[in-house]
Image (cartoon, helix red, strand yellow):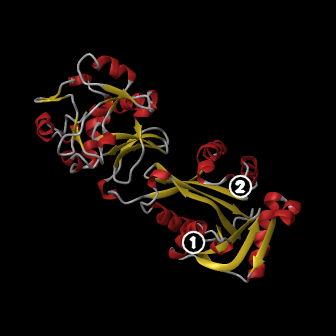
Amino acid sequence: MLKRILKSGTCAKCRICCKYDDDDVWDAPGFTEEEYKENKVKTEAAFIQRDDGLYYLKMEKDSEGIYTCPCLGENGCTLGDSRPFRCGLWPMYLINTEHGLGFALSPVCPEVWKLGSEEIFESVRGKLLLINKIGHDCPTLIEDWSPEYRMIAIPDEKGNYHYLPDEEGLDPHLHFRELSDEEVQDLHENVLKKDFPEDELKKLDIIIKLKHKGAYITLAVYDRGVFVGYAFFSTDSSNKGLCILDYFAVMPELRGKGYGTRILSLITSHFSDKTNLMCEVEDPFATDDPETKQFREKRMNFYISNGWHDTGLSVFMYGVDYRIIGSPVGTFKNPEDVLGEYRKIYVDMVGEEELSVNMKINNF
């Protein structure tokens, strides 16, 4: 794929892409059904079909802890031009982005990594449509995003590809995008239900109704076009008063990599015009279970360590005690005014009768 910028002799001398250790053996390429049928007669190596539907070459670890592709010969790959798509595309990956499939670069290949993004992009420009079609026809060939990858090219809203300047490097370039009703439904069904307990999850029809009234904000977070997290907010319809961070999560494979802190910073900047921006965390002091207490403290301390503060307010909601945490933005008014705004938002959300039965807002 990169023959215009990478000599075959360079690859034959390196061969790093055909050898793996325990940390990167997951990156060994999978064969599609068609590729498997074409290549199984060209090698005596055994194949294993995994849950993703692809076929993988069976590799044994040697005495030095290295797995070597059984199709690697003295002069390179014995499969020649029939090698699998993933091998042909490597060290690039197909990644789902905001407007379609993007191209990311693995840090493993030392020769390609040191090249400029424009040079790499131009070397594959003529094959972008073909690569895009293959990816759409076989979604299992699309990889999950990793912050260690370098994004080379992404499509714009019209589907036209452009390369990302080198100065972007690996530093996150985060931005929000408002979700459509269809996207909210997909996220609610496939992501929120995994990230939050059932008793904490609002019904989809309530979220959509509030969204149409201007009392609910649903934002997806992207890093250079790649979906990395989401943030949902309850607010008053004027969009100038109190705003409550309702649901906030980073995609599972990206947790522990600093995205939570960066997104929280983006949130405070994005809502800097709000009178108050707050969130609710389960009260760590309202449980006697050590494990539950530790989990809640960790979650609460995440906000505190990022400049948020305990307001001294709490809400008892559907059997659970929450502490109300305030962000660094806005002006914290007296507790009675804040509780009044809180009450208005929840009356709009669930109605006066349900609020009186299932919720109690406190100043302690």
Element on which disc 2 rests: helix
120 left or right of 210?
left
Residue that label 1 marks: 297
The image quarter in which residue 346 lies: bottom right
The correct choice, above or below, for 13 with respect to 289 in the image is above
47 up-or-down from 289: above or below? above
Which amino acid type is marked by label 2? Asp
Residue on which disc 2 sits: 199
Q: Residue most toward the right?
A: 353
For the point 30% across and 48% down, which residue is it? Answer: 23
Question: Label 1 is placed on what type of residue?
Answer: Glu
Identify the image quadrant of residue 324.
bottom right
Residue found at x 51% / y 65%: 266
Q: Residue at x 25, y 45 (%)?
A: 21
- Residue 127 is situated, as x and y percent measured from the top left of the image, at 32, 31
For residue 217, which numbered disc appears in the image? none
Location of the N terminus by quadrant is: top left
Residue 360 shown left or right of residue 90 in the figure: right
Which element carries disc 1, helix, strand or loop? helix
Above-or-below relation of 305 to 6:
below
Q: Quadrant of the C terminus?
A: bottom right
Given residues 204 and 31, the one toward you in this image is 31
**x then y, percent, for residue 121:** 29, 42
Tell me where residue 144 appears, x and y as whole percent: 42, 44
x then y, percent, for residue 251: 50, 52
- Marks counted in the figure total 2
Q: Quadrant of residue 128 in the image?
A: top left
Q: What is the crowding at mark 2: few (fewer than 14 residues within 10 Å), some, or many (at least 20)?
A: few
Res. 179 visible in picture: no
Residue 170 shows up from this direction: yes
The answer to whether residue 152 is left or right of residue 263 is left
Asked if labels 1 and 2 touch by Cβ distance under 8 angstroms, the answer is no
